[in-house]
Image (spheres, helix red, strand yellow):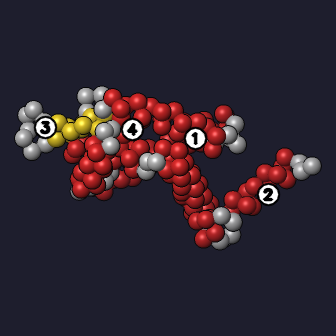
Amino acid sequence: MMKRDDASHALLRDARELGHEARAGSGDHAALKLWLRMLATTTQIEAEIRRRLREQFGISLARFDYMAQLYRYKRGLQMGALSRYLMVTGGNVTGLTDELERDGLVAREAHPDDRRAWIVCLTTKGHRAFEAMAQQHEQWILELFAGLDAKTVQQLYTQLGALRVQLVRTERLPEEKA
């Protein structure tokens, strides 16, 4: 039987051999290695979630994300706001809206104050479908992170939060200099 430390080292060695991390050399900065590991991990988790959504629900991750945004806004969202929240073009949102509307999962209504704008909201069928998917999605995430104890998850969450704050501050610097 392998000791815990031996098993941990084996897992780390295997992780280095996967995906984006293979690009890093032993002499590269730790920050570069961390970036590549984060990228590889995120890519791997996202691919698995995409596969499971398609397999179990016949839906793409883009549709799931779209429905998640609408689920947060019970009164619906203007398509322009939806585009910004999803960080995709208006054309992408229109295409997804058309598909989801055909499937009876969303409804599109004219904006009461702006004849050029549309408000999109989940239908009752869409609401129920999203809740079932979201519940399963949460279980998948818990399963995929099950190898980490609660303390480690909290530490990673905190540290990545600090990194995000630092990144936001860095993004603002060029604007402040102007």
| Alpha carbon separation for disc pair 4 and 2 | 38 Å
**Residue placed at 30% from the left, 28% from the top?**
74
Q: Residue at x 65, y 64 (%)?
A: 18
- Give the crowd class for mark 4: few <14, some 14-19, many >=20 residues within 10 Å: some
Between discs 3 and 1, the one toward the N terminus? 3
Q: Is residue 46 left or right of residue 81?
A: right
Where 62 falls versus 15 (above or below)? above
The answer to whether one can see residue 30 in this image is: yes
Q: Is residue 82 visible?
A: no
**Residue in front for this viewpoint, 162 or 20:** 20
Residue 87 spot, x, y in % from top left? 32, 51
Q: Which residue is mark 4?
A: 68
Q: CA distance from mark 2 to mark 3?
A: 58 Å
Using a 10 Å C-alpha cutoff, classify the residue at mark 1 as few (fewer than 14 neighbours), some (14 to 19) or many (20 or more). few
Q: Nearer the viewer, mark 2 or mark 3?
A: 3
Q: Are marks 4 and 2 in contact (CB under 8 Å)?
A: no
Mark-to-mark CA distance, 2 and 1: 23 Å
Q: Position of residue 79 (x, y in %)?
A: 22, 44
Q: Amino acid at mark 1?
A: Ile
Q: Which residue is mark 1?
A: 141
Residue 7 in the figure: left or right of residue 23: right
Q: CA distance from mark 1 to mark 4?
A: 15 Å
Reading the image, the residue beneath label 3 is 110
Sequence-wise, which precedes: disc 2 or disc 1?
A: 2
Q: Secondary structure at mark 1?
A: helix
Residue identifier under label 2:
10
- SS at circle 4: helix
Q: CA distance from mark 3 to mark 4?
A: 21 Å
Residue 10: name its quadrant.
bottom right
